[in-house]
Amino acid sequence: MAPLAVPLMLAGTAVSAYGQYKQAAGYESMGDAAAQQGLMEQQILDQNAKIEERVGQAKLVRAQEEARQLGKEGEALKGRASVLQAKSGTTGPTNFAVLEDMSNEIETDRMILLRNGYLEKWFALSSSENMKYQGRVDVVRGLNEQQGYEYQAKGAKLAAVGTLLTGSGSVYGMNSMKSTNKDSYLKWKYGV
């Protein structure tokens, strides 16, 4: 056996084990990055959820204002119609029916505006809750990925230890065989 074989085997074993430890560190780093990304995605979704809630509230306020304004305009229109009716001197049931229909249409339009405003707010709140839930899912996914990478890192570390043990065992075996062969040769040659 060449005199450099044992040191070369030990060096090869050390380099291989070092590579496996570096691979383990890479897995750990990837796991940390996955967990961080999950947290970042949750923060982004939480911010988007808050914005969605504000938008929903703003839509409701806008609808309430439009309904208030429509009601105000309707009351003014009814007032003008009443004044015109009084000036004309007609007081028949038809004129009151027209005013009542006009009043009902205005109120119906107001209620539709308010209903749509509340619906938009509820849809925004629902969307906001979905975003928050997705954020929690992203955190859990990130943590699960981190755990998977931790297992891969442990596997790589165990492989490195196995490589060191295998390499050491090979060197020991070679040295053991060398001394055994030497002893056998001496017994054969000299009868010792």
Image (cartoon, rainbow, N blue to C red):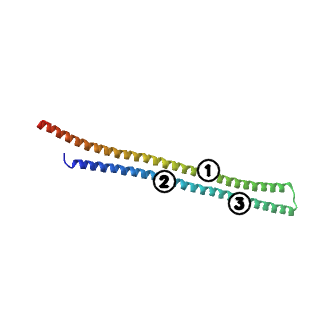
Residue 55: name its quadrant: bottom right
- Residue at screen point 45% across, 52% down: 32
Considering the numbered disc 3 on the image, is that residue within a helix, a strand or a loop? helix
- Residue at screen point 70% across, 55% down: 114
Q: Give the amino acid at mark 2.
A: Gln
**Earlier along the polypeptide chain: callout 3 or callout 1?**
3
| Residue hosting label 1 | 126
Q: Nearer the viewer, residue 4 or 186?
A: 186
Q: Nearer the viewer, residue 149 or 59?
A: 149
Percent of width and height locating residue 86:
86, 62
Percent of width and height locating residue 83:
84, 63
Q: How many neighbours does mark 1 have within 10 angstroms: few (below 14), some (14-19), or many (20 or more)? A: some
Q: Give the amino acid at mark 1.
A: Ser
Q: How many neighbours does mark 2 have within 10 angstroms: few (below 14), some (14-19), or many (20 or more)? A: some
- Residue at screen point 63% across, 52% down: 125
**Earlier along the polypeptide chain: callout 2 or callout 1?**
2
Q: Nearer the viewer, residue 65 or 88?
A: 65
